[in-house]
Amino acid sequence: RELVVEVQNFSSVVDLIQKSKKILVLTGAGVSVSCGIPDFRSPGGLYDTVRDRFGLEEPQALFDINFFKFNPNPFFTLAKDIFPGGNVVPSLAHRFVRKIETKGQLLRNYTQNIDGLEKMSGIERVIHCHGSFATATCRRCQNQVPGESIREEVLAERIPVCNVCRDRPVEQGEEKPILKPDIVFFGEKLVNAFFDNVNADIENADLMIVMGTSLKVAPVARLPSLLDTKVPRILINREVVGSSSQRFDVELLGNCDEVVKALMDRLDDSSQVTERDES
Ligand code: OAD
Ligand code: ZN
């Protein structure tokens, strides 16, 4: 793939963002790392913790629906650490996305995160591709409850059980009446909002910004490659990600808050310049 934009310097990246009207932002765990929430795959990340604590060779099993059916204990041992709440506040990277939105330039923020920080930063045009802790569903009778109603149990490291069907004995071949938070596990379908919007958004986007994700998990990881080749794509991440056939037009490598800070400073500057020009 040929590069779409020839970026001479940082200010041409700023110009690109400035003039785009329908920005598709794709985020992952990296945007919340500065908030004190570890990502999954970096050294010392959640998957290292899982490997150490449970001796799981494949730590992704923690979020695998078949493993969960077989043994939900590891997930519920760790769930209290990833249950949203506490004193966590959004990062500059979240606020950057919100700022794009308040300027009317955000087509959508596709996030893979389940920490609830998009909502907390005020982002409205967000799709939680991998679900959230906002609700939980009984594995047996599909009864859905607000996530808040299982918070206490989860924080106490107890497995929350369904009030509707708990007294009915478990028959053979049936799952236990466990309330599983509605985060999307491996082997589960992404949220409907993803499928409802993704085709139109891919069609309409005029810029893509990918931030803080390893792009290792499909189908979200495929979004950059689905865009028309004329649509520029910017990566803001600690490391280069994506396949060589879907390389980014601009790679701003580093901690996303720092990169974003530099961008926001310039965006503020240039909007002042425009205002002065127009007066
Ligand atoms: P990963 O942990 O796979 O990737 C995080 C990426 O962010 C890595 O490329 C890091 O280098 C980068 N990164 C970390 N801290 C950063 C920082 N401060 N600034 C910039 N970049 C930083 O997380 P995701 O890509 O979000 O799914 O993982 C995708 C999915 O895999 C998750 O949604 C989760 C997981 O299994 C489910 O649980 C279903
Ligand atoms: Zn039930």
Image (tube, rainbow, N blue to C red):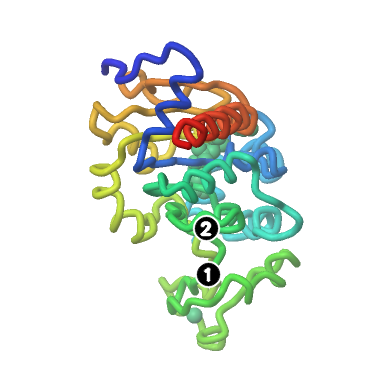
Crowding at dot 2, Cα within 10 Å, few <14 / some 14-19 / many 20+, comes out as some
Q: Where is residue 217 in the image (x, y as percent from the top left)?
A: 42, 39
**Residue 9 locus on image (x, y percent):** 48, 13
Horizontally, residue 211 falls left or right of residue 224, namely right
Q: Can residue 169 be seen in this view?
A: yes
Q: Which of 77 and 228 is in front in this view?
A: 228
Q: Is residue 37 above or below residue 152?
A: above
Q: In which quarter of the image is residue 127?
A: bottom left
Asked if ligand 2 lies within 8 A of label 1, the reply is: no
Mark 1 sits on what residue? 135
Residue type beneath disc 1:
Thr
| Figure quadrant, ligand 1 | top right
| Left or right of residue 120: residue 273 | left
Q: In this view, does 98 lie above or below 170?
A: above
Residue type pointed to by label 2? Phe
Q: x%, y% of residue 16?
A: 40, 27
Of 76 and 20, nearer the camera is 20
Q: In this view, does 94 lie above or below 252?
A: below
Instruction: Answer with left or right where residue 133 lies relative to residue 87.
Output: left
- Quarter of the image where the N terminus is located: top left
Circle 1 — which element? strand
Instruction: Name the residue at 33% across, 27% down.
Output: 232
Q: Looking at the image, which is closer to me, 168 or 179? A: 179
Q: Which residue is drawn at 33% across and 38% down?
A: 223
Residue hosting label 2: 68
Callout 2: helix, strand or loop? Answer: helix
In terms of sequence position, does the residue under pointer 2 or pointer 1 come before the other?
A: 2
Say few, some or many: other residues with alpha carbon within 10 Å of mark 1 (under 14 / 14 to 19 / 20 or more).
some
